[in-house]
Amino acid sequence: MNIEKVDVRDIAQRFGTPVYVYSLSILRQAIAEIRPLSPVVRFAMKACSNTRILQEMLKSGIKIDAVSVPEIQRALKAGYPPEDICLSSDVFFNAEEAEFCLKNNIFCSCGSLGMLEEYGETRQRLGLGSDGVSIRINPGEGAGHSKKTNTGGPYSKHGIWYENLDEAKAIAKKYDLKIVGAHTHIGSGGDMAHLSRITGKLVDFAKQFPDLQIINFGGGLPYEYDPDKPQVDISDYQPILKERTQELEKHFGRPITCEIEPGRRFVAGCGYLIGEVRSLNHTFDEHKKRLDYVLTNVGFCHLLRPMAYGSYHPIWFAGDGLGKETDIIVAGPVCESGDVLTQKNEEPVPRRLPLPRRGSLIVIGGAGAYGHVMSSNYNSQPLIPEVLVDGGTMTLMRRRQTLDDVIREEEQ
Ligand code: LLP
């Protein structure tokens, strides 16, 4: 199996496994597909924050949606100017974060009444004058691939509840802030129907802010992980966004800037996680049916999504001597029975795949978004490398951690 022109066996041999691999050409195709959707497009860098990926976004005219000051600092280090970065969060992690944003002219979208208050207070304390700020609105409903990624509705902590906008206006007045941006993000992994409809709701809310300059419709562009199903068509989003913005321009009688901030759709498809089959095992269920387990060296410390949300990722095996197709449960090395790559609703689900053997490679697709960024040192596993493939060349863009890296911050 190849990623662009490189055989996955060559990648495994050169960098070891497990290893994250990104195809530059697939990334560029995704950028080319998303860039025309809106006059301003931000990359929700939480999905994949390696500097090399950020630099590719920068070169392509994509701005940044950051969720924390460390993300802002990574974007600045990658070469982004502060004016291209927006912080969109519901809290400042601490008082210094609020000061950092204000002192460095980072535009902020405040996703809670308390954050807006802290923004205003900090601005006053620093002796800065009137200022433009954005608010994130919870429109009362949302959509996501899991309850955990649906960010609208009464059970979401995100955004200023749509019925509390007068409170937001009062806070803004108290601190002499101008609400120049209205923003919403209804969730991650939802569908185009929800996204398109809720853009209309945001427009209605936004009309009550007389200083409005920017409308930000958030991220949440869907991505189909199953390569046997057609990819979700997102091209219809452009005319919808245009129409929504024009409605606001008509209402206010001046130009309004339209923004979106997808993460997953930019990077999911370009990322692969390559590991190795380490062992085979089997059990028998209560009907004496045999269950085949393939144990690999890829666990939820490397890719959390199947364990966290029951997410589907395509799996291929590569190498010599693959057996006939069998129903297989693919698992990892982490010492927890939830460490299963093929699962749904917290249950292992067998998948029909050619039976690999010890030493076969496993390639997991759709791993570019919320993959490496959500990995951990659980079981004292070092964080794994990231490699960029461009045609026939492979470049290391992050090295493998050593055990020394893992224990570096401990006091001896
Ligand atoms: N904007 C805001 C304010 C967000 O919170 C997010 C994602 C995005 C944009 C980008 O959403 P996207 O276009 O990627 O759907 N770890 C989960 C996803 C968490 C999403 C968090 N916020 C997963 O692996 O599915």
Image (cartoon, rainbow, N blue to C red):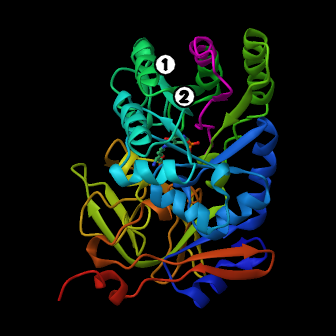
Magenta: main secondary structure equals loop
Q: CA distance from mark 2 to mark 1?
A: 7 Å
Q: Nearer the N terminus, badge 2 or badge 1?
A: 1
- Residue placed at 71% from the left, 67% from the top? 23
Q: Secondary structure at mark 1?
A: loop
Q: Is residue 134 above or below residue 19?
A: above
**Residue 257 figure quarter:** top right
In this rendering, does residue 348 appear at all?
Answer: no
Q: List x then y, in percent, for residue 214.
A: 67, 29
Q: Residues within 10 Å of mark 2 (few under 14, many from 20)?
A: many
Residue closer to the observer: 12 or 295: 12
- Residue placed at 41% from the left, 32% from the top? 116
- Residue placed at 50% from the left, 81% from the top? 17
Residue 184: assigned label: 2
How many labels were placed on the picture?
A: 2
Seen from this angle, which residue lies furthest left? 412
**Amino acid type for the residue under numbered disc 2:** Thr
Q: Is residue 260 above or below residue 17?
A: above
Range of magenta residues: 201-224
Quadrant for the N terminus, please. bottom right
In this rendering, does residue 101 appear at all?
Answer: yes
- Judging by the rendered image, the residue that carries numbered circle 1 is 139
